[in-house]
């Protein structure tokens, strides 16, 4: 047997072990390493993907970190070519589109937990702040939503006509407003309070009830309406030693 034949047999054996692992345990029960090993076989047709998976996890720490990494950074990992790098980056887009598709079932949002979960499913990943309006029927079922890029106190003055047209077009009865604090605390700034007070003024002009006003942080969310922090993992109330902002007084 030649050296090339031996290498091919080793790689074939590695992939067979992966397939047996999935058949025996189910793909949903794979740990991050073995899931990544298997995923890499779709673009790396011959090489052993185990060391590449190890190096990716060492560099980016998690599946989430790998999927959200820039192509240039992924290419720095030995064994990752441009095709594989783009494939890995596309995984986060696939996950977002899947969750967005599920969110389009027009769910009924009756609790803060349901609202935060829904917001996390429809807002695309981004290092920049994003703003979203969710319009609901009288029974709190989602009618429509729209994501805007960027949010500031000047946003409402620059885009008031666009926001008003959107609210009128979908005949909003109730509305949820939220924006993101990427990789930051959900604690509201004075600028946040001024901005959302402006939004409240617009909603009042159209007799639209604001159900919730949420800031989505890295690990927590903050309700400007109820002045409470929530854990993003289980939506339980999080007690925080910080200034208790009064939304109505700003």
Image (spheres, helix red, strand yellow):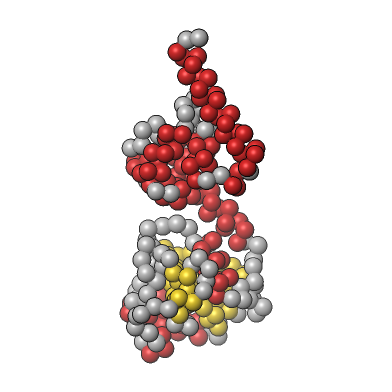
Q: Position of residue 208 (x, y in %)?
A: 55, 82
Q: Position of residue 164 (x, y in %)?
A: 50, 75
Give the total number of marks visible in the rendering.
0
Judged from this view, the residue extending furthest toward the bottom is 249
Q: Quadrant of the C terminus?
A: bottom left
Classify 122 as above or below 178. above
State the residue at coordinates (48%, 42%). Answer: 33
Classify 137 as above or below 32. below
Residue 244 visible in the current orientation: yes
State the residue at coordinates (53%, 68%). Answer: 234
Q: Position of residue 191 (x, y in %)?
A: 33, 77
Classify 209 as above or below 23. below
Near-viewer residue (124 or 218): 218
Question: Which quadrant of the structure image shows residue 118?
Answer: bottom right
Q: Position of residue 236 (x, y in %)?
A: 51, 74
Near-viewer residue (101 or 199): 101
Residue 199 visible in the current orientation: no
Near-viewer residue (3 or 222): 3
State the residue at coordinates (35%, 72%). Answer: 152
Does residue 222 appear left or right of residue 96 in this picture? left
State the residue at coordinates (62%, 34%). Answer: 20
Classify 27 as above or below 218. above
């Amino acid at each position: 047997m030649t050296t090339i034949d031996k290498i091919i047999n080793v790689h074939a054996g590695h992939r067979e072990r992966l397939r047996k692992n999935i058949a025996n345990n189910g793909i949903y029960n794979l740990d991050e390493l073995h899931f990544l090993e298997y995923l890499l076989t779709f673009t790396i047709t011959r090489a052993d993907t185990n060391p590449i998976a190890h190096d990716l996890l060492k560099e980016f720490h998690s599946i989430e970190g790998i999927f959200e990494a820039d192509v240039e950074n992924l290419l720095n990992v030995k064994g990752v070519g441009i095709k594989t790098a783009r494939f890995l980056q596309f995984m986060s887009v696939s996950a977002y589109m899947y969750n967005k598709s599920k969110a389009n079932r027009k769910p009924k949002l009756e609790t803060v937990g349901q609202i935060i979960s829904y917001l996390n499913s429809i807002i695309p990943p981004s290092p920049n702040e994003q703003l979203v309006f969710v319009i609901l029927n009288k029974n709190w079922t989602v009618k429509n939503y729209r994501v805007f890029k960027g949010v500031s106190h000047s946003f409402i003055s620059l885009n008031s006509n666009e926001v008003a047209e959107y609210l009128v077009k979908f005949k909003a009865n109730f509305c949820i407003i939220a924006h993101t604090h990427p990789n930051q605390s959900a604690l509201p700034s004075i600028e946040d309070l001024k901005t959302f007070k402006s939004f409240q003024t617009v909603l009042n002009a159209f007799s639209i009830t604001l159900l919730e006003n949420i800031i989505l942080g890295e690990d927590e969310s903050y309700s400007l309406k109820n002045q409470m922090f929530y854990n993003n993992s289980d939506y339980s109330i999080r007690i925080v030693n910080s200034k208790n902002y009064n939304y109505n007084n700003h």
